[in-house]
Image: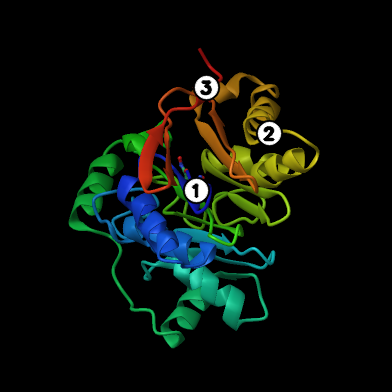
Amino acid sequence: KTKFPIAVCTWAFTSANAKAGEELAQGKDALDAVIAGVAVEEENIKNTTVGKGGAPDREGNVTLDACVMNPEGDCGAVVCVENITNVAALAKKVMEETPHVMLAGEGAEEFGYRQGFEKENLLTEDSKKAWEEWKKSPEYKPIINIENHDTIGMLAIDKDGDIAGACTTSGLSYKMKGRVGDSPIIGSGLFIDNEIGGAVATGMGEEVMKTVGSFLIVELMRNGMSPQEACEEAIRRIVSKNERYKDFQIAYLAMNKAGEVGSYCIHEGFTYMKYQDGENTNVKPGFFYH
Ligand code: SD4
């Protein structure tokens, strides 16, 4: 078995992970592979949790968040983007073509159009209908394991052994206007350190941000934990605070530079994808709440 390349992503996003795997097998670097991988879901209007077709906020606006991080430790992020589908690719442009790390809303979009991104309406008929239905008795109640596929966070190690990652989402359905979750926040939804490895998060963004989950996992790995131990400790930090975790899901996925993968979540139902040596498999990690 050849160890590298490897790609992993949150949830059963089979084709997205396969796409990243193909790109890596063709010799693409880790960052381009994860961006091509997550783009599959950003463009898939059937899923309501990432990209075009994502569920809107409570006022009917679809707002996307994304970030990327490369082996050099550079990062780019965009938040509250309303009219561009491929926000992970846009985050890469922010990283490469601006002196900044993060652009928000209109500024991010105007920059995107100048970079050649197309202006699109991200609210599909189906998402609009579901939102109109929701408005009849509006209640903000994030659903655990919504559709069994949620934010996509992806990590890849390329043939040279370098690691990069991307995280992209439409955020929690029917969130408040202007709400930004963990997914585009470097250290929360994603963190990469090419000496150590990387981590991504999905689930209740507010709780991931309070504990800076992905950065925490990478630092725990730096201090000697395996990816599995580090993910479990990061979940422990959340569930040990109070009992509210019973009502929300968080899942972490981590990989170290040796290509070892670990994952842990609060509630049963989360799975992740792993591509290695031409095989793309769905893996069910352990969970905290029984
Ligand atoms: C967020 N972490 O915006 C994302 C959404 C998600 O399960 O993964 N929901 O908080």
Tag count = 3
Q: Quadrant of residue 38?
A: bottom left
Estimate the spatial distance between the alpha carbons at disc 1 and disc 2, rounded to whole Å. Answer: 21 Å
Task: Say which residue label 3 marks.
Answer: 287
Q: Of the residues shown, which amino acid type is indicated by label 2?
A: Ser
Q: Amino acid at mark 1?
A: Thr
User: Is 230 left, or right, of 37 in this rendering?
Assistant: right
Q: Secondary structure at mark 2?
A: loop
Where is 71 relative to 151, above or below?
Answer: below
Residue shown at the point (46%, 66%) measured from the top left: 27
Question: For the residue carrying disc 1, how many other residues have a C-alpha within 10 Å: few (<14), some (14-19), or many (20+)?
Answer: few
Q: Residues within 10 Å of mark 3 (few under 14, many from 20)?
A: some
Viewer-side label of 3, 1: 1
Q: Earlier in the sequence, mark 1 or mark 2?
A: 1
- Observer able to see residue 185: yes
Secondary structure beneath label 1: loop
Q: Say which mark, if any, is on residue 226.
A: 2
- Kind of residue at disc 3: Phe
Horizontal and vertical percent position of residue 45? 25, 56
Beta carbon at label 1 within 8 Å of ligand 1? no
